[in-house]
Amino acid sequence: MPSKSDLPSFESYFRPTVECVKARGGSITIEEMEEAVAAFMQLSDELRAVPHGDGPRSQFDYELAWVRTYLKKVGAMENSERGVWRLTPAGAAMSDAELAAVPRRVREMDRQRREAREVEQDIDAAQEATELSWKDALLAALLGIQPDAFERLCQRILRESGFTKVEVTGRSGDGGIDGTGVLRLNLLSFHVLFQSKRIRGSVGASTIRDFRGAMVGRADKGLVITTGSFTPEARREATRDGAPAIDLVDGDALCDLLKQLRIGVEVKLVEEIEVNPPYFDTI
């Protein structure tokens, strides 16, 4: 069984990440990035599934999230609220040596930023409110609630996202179907069955197959929402040719949804004040 020590070093992820974004025209979703970088680095499904501590993330997903954060800090990448990451001109022009030096450069930037502030504790606290830390805290809170509460949360998410007639069924022995809803897009409407899985680990392909078997003939679309992650086999099964597609929302995407919908997540803007001493020399 592979362990964290079998994965590549953190520094080795940067060039593959940039190359994969370039290969897709300069922009990429997180899911596409994970698949592309894993293929580029020839990482097996077993290595990709190595867990990060006791949390719901895999170590691979965790490392790649930090890679995105570091590249954003040095101005090499930007991201939208819809989870699409874009390579900036500066990022596209970075050499292999510059990419390998990104972690050291970010650590130096953070050190200089701390030294430039008088209240170091406040800055340290603000720095901890990164994409990773708030998502880890949010996932920990979700894992602490009861399964039926998580089902109701998924119901609320679907309603806030434009679904109507959203009902939680939660009947046992029903192929994992936890609820139903209707999504209307202009003149068309789609009947959707959803499954909610409040877990720490990964959802496998067998779960997706069982869910699809239960939804065939009963709905137009399927949706699986989890606090954990999906194995590569599960993602492939969800989009298998010739079978009804099932949309997947993992823990990372779920956090983004809750932030976007402001459900259990507050976004606060921190005021930054900088003094410009040279200005006073011009008076």
Image: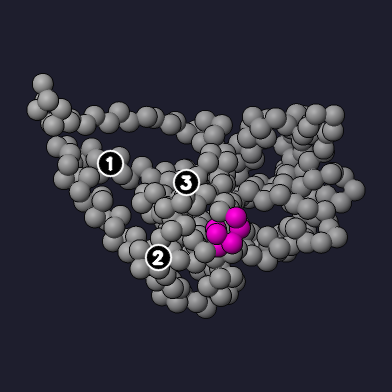
Task: Look at the image and say whether residue 108 sits in the magenta stretch.
Answer: no
CB contact under 8 Å: marks 3 and 1: no
In this view, the residue in front, 27 or 8, is: 27
At which x and y percent is residue 109?
A: 26, 51
User: Which mark sits nearer the N-terminus, 2 or 3?
Assistant: 3
- Nearer to us of marks 1 and 2 is 2
Q: Residue at x 82, y 53 (%)?
A: 244
Secondary structure, mark 2, is loop
Callout 2: few (<14), some (14-19), or many (20+) C-alpha neighbours within 10 Å? few
Residue 135 in view (yes/no): yes
Residue 146 seen in render: no
Residue 212's spot in the image, x, y percent? 80, 55
Left or right? Give the position of 18 relative to 169: left
Q: In what element is the residue under mark 1?
A: helix
Dividing the picture into quarters, in which one does residue 125 lie? top left
The colour scheme of the drawn protein is: one colour
Return the x and y of residue 111 as percentages of the image width and height. Answer: 21, 51
> In the image, residue 13 lies at what x, y percent?
45, 66
Name which residue type carries label 1.
Answer: Ala
Give the structural element (helix, strand or loop) at label 3: strand
Q: Look at mark 2 in the image and give the residue it sits on.
A: 95
Q: Which residue is mark 3?
A: 78
Check the picture and name the quadrant holding the C terminus. Answer: top left
Residue that carries the numbered disc 1 in the rendered image: 125
Q: CA distance from mark 1 to mark 2?
A: 33 Å
Residue toward you, 230 or 274: 274
Q: Amino acid at mark 3?
A: Glu
Rounded to the nearest angstrom, the CA distance separating label 2 from label 3 is: 18 Å
Three-letter code for the amino acid on which mark 2 is drawn: Ser
Magenta-colored span: 20-25
Furthest residue toward front: 282
Residue found farthest to the right: 217
